[in-house]
Image: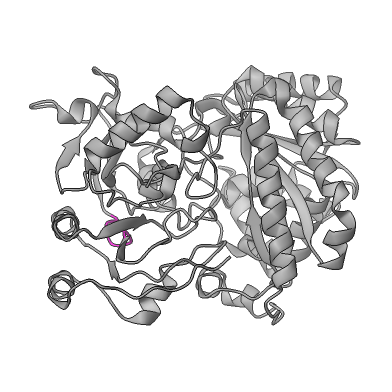
């Protein structure tokens, strides 16, 4: 899982120019920024952290003139080698200081922010105005950035009705490999503003979900909607995986639940094992505060407290839904409609603690990137049609069953998260949790209160190889069924699986926007 570290051959004079723009070259910083949640790459030659778009442009121009590759890094939450160098003479573009919200236009209903802005930061800025973006963040939104999310695409908050993050975008400001600044959609119109995406060919879409391979994102503009005033939640359990899959698809087709997500019994057990009394108290406080009135808040908080940890049966598959809207009556009607559908598919209603807690605490610290005792964690996923989800999920489960003895030998736990994307995307995300050494990125991301419980596992090469091989086998299953993927990075076989003419066009586009193959080479299967 680790690429050999390579030395830089960038001339000192060029490094001097980059240092004058605030670039770091010390080994500790470069090594830290060259790893993701899954693996370590070749160590970058430098790390550039621009504070303005003008500085970003200068750094890109210097890199282009000197044949230096630049890999864009948002929050570092990739688990698909999304930004890590796979060769020498690569600089990391760290977007953490490009985090300003430049315009909130409540009249024209859009918001523009720099790419390093986090989803949490954006949502907190919009909340007092009674506004929100349609898709409003992944579960990792406390640190995940807009630019990283739009390069890799996101699922979760709002995705059940509004689709993934890229469907909420109206315009982008991107910088091509040679430093050329391009504004897409109506932002590129003389005297225009970034209010509308669909004016001529959709150049905005070209740079979305591109794994950071086609241009460097400087600013993004997203649509705004009035913040829904009411919400309700429901949870269900099933005696089988197949029932859960069928119910999930049936709910998604209705397009009225803003979030639809489920877990297998093992992942539920693993997540509950980590929770502490302190976390529970904080959670209850947020639930109470988030209900609009003290009485309703106390009532909902009491339900959670009474349910304790026993709101899902040990061997049950669970499904959770959230509906939101402009009136309590409308939301209740939507929830009731979905309850009937889920009941018809074999679901039994249970305490709705999980969706209620997640909605009240949407962007929590990223302690789930480790197992309950400090084990490593890595997911893999595929997005499949509703009609194929049940069979594909079953095939993956059969793969895991065939490896049960090996998993037990190497203490590898597995689980599943499922969620939906509007009416036509069913996302299946198997996860692996196993004992192995932690990387600096884990230690920097996870809270100290969680990290102190981590056991000091050494390197487990055989276990690591088994996880890597099984991940690859899961990807093979997804590919066999024509699945799509987010976070393509250097893991999912995107360009390799295009038909010949599509592949040719993709390479021609890459050659136009990045003639020297300087932008995140190797990502998206290019270069």
Considering the whole magenta stretch, tell me its main secondary structure.
loop
Q: Quadrant of the N terminus?
A: bottom right
Q: Nearer the viewer, residue 361 or 75?
A: 75
Left or right, residue 19 beside residue 387: left
Q: Is residue 487 left or right of residue 45?
A: right
Q: Quadrant of residue 356?
A: top right
Range of residues picked out in magenta: 94-99
Q: Which residue appears at 31% of the width and 49% of the height?
A: 115
From this view, report whether residue 415 is shown above or below residue 428: below
What's the residue at 61%, 62% (across, down)?
369
In this view, the residue farthest toward the front is 500
Residue occupying the point 66% across, 35% down? 478
Q: Is residue 132 magenta?
A: no
Instruction: Measuring from the top left, give residue 260's x and y in whole percent.
Output: 66, 34
Q: Is residue 27 visible?
A: yes
Depth check, front residue: 93 or 231: 93
Q: Is residue 523 left or right of residue 413?
A: left
Residue occupying the point 56% across, 73% down:
439
- The spot of residue 275 in percent (x, y) is 73, 64
Judge by depth and name the residue closer to the eye, 234 or 88: 88
């Amino acid at each position: 899982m680790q690429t050999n570290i390579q030395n830089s051959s960038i001339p000192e004079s060029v490094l001097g120019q980059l240092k004058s723009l605030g670039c770091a070259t010390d080994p500790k910083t470069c090594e830290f920024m060259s790893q993701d949640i899954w693996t370590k790459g070749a160590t970058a030659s430098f790390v550039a952290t621009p504070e303005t778009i003008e500085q970003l442009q200068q750094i890109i121009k210097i890199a282009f003139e000197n044949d230096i590759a630049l890999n864009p890094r948002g929050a570092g939450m990739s688990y698909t080698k999304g930004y890590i160098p796979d060769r020498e003479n690569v600089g990391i573009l760290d977007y953490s200081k490009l985090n300003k919200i430049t315009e909130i236009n409540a009249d024209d209903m859009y918001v523009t922010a720099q790419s390093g802005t986090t989803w949490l930061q954006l949502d907190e800025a919009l909340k007092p105005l009674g506004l929100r973006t349609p898709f409003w963040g992944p579960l990792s939104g406390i640190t995940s950035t807009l630019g990283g999310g739009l390069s890799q695409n996101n699922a979760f908050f709002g995705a059940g009705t509004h689709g993934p993050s890229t469907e909420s975008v109206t315009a982008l400001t991107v910088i091509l490999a040679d430093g050329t600044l391009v504004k897409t959609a109506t932002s590129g119109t003389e005297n225009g503003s970034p209010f509308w995406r669909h004016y001529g060919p959709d150049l905005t879409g070209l740079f979305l979900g591109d794994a950071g391979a086609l241009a460097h994102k400087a600013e993004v503009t997203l649509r705004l909607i009035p913040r829904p005033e009411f919400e309700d939640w429901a949870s269900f359990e099933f005696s089988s995986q197949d029932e859960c899959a069928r119910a999930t698809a049936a709910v998604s087709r209705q397009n009225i639940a803003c979030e639809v997500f489920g877990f297998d019994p093992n992942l539920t057990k693993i997540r509950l094992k980590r929770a502490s009394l302190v976390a529970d108290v904080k959670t209850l406080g947020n639930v109470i505060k988030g209900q609009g009135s003290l009485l309703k808040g106390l009532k909902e908080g009491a339900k959670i407290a009474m349910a304790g940890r026993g709101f899902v049966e040990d061997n049950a598959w669970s499904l959770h839904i959230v509906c939101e809207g402009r009136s309590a009556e409308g939301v209740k009607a939507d929830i009731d409609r979905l309850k009937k559908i889920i009941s018809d598919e074999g679901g039994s209603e249970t305490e709705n603690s999980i969706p209620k807690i997640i909605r009240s605490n949407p962007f929590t610290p990223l302690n789930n990137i480790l197992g309950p005792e400090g084990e490593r964690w890595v997911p893999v996923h595929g997005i499949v049609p509703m009609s194929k989800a049940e069979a594909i999920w079953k095939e993956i489960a059969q793969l895991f069953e065939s490896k049960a003895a090996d998993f037990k030998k190497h203490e590898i736990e597995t689980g599943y998260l499922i969620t939906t994307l509007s009416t036509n995307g069913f996302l299946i995300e198997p996860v692996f949790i196993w004992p192995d050494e932690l990387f600096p990125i884990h230690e920097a991301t996870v809270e100290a209160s969680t990290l102190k419980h981590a056991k000091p596992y050494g390197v487990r090469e055989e276990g690591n190889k088994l996880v890597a091989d099984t991940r690859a086998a899961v990807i093979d299953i997804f590919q066999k069924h024509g699945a799509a993927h987010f976070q393509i990075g250097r893991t999912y076989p995107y360009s390799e699986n295009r038909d010949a003419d599509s592949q040719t066009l993709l390479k021609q586009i890459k050659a136009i926007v990045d003639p020297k193959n300087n932008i995140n080479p190797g990502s998206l299967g290019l270069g």
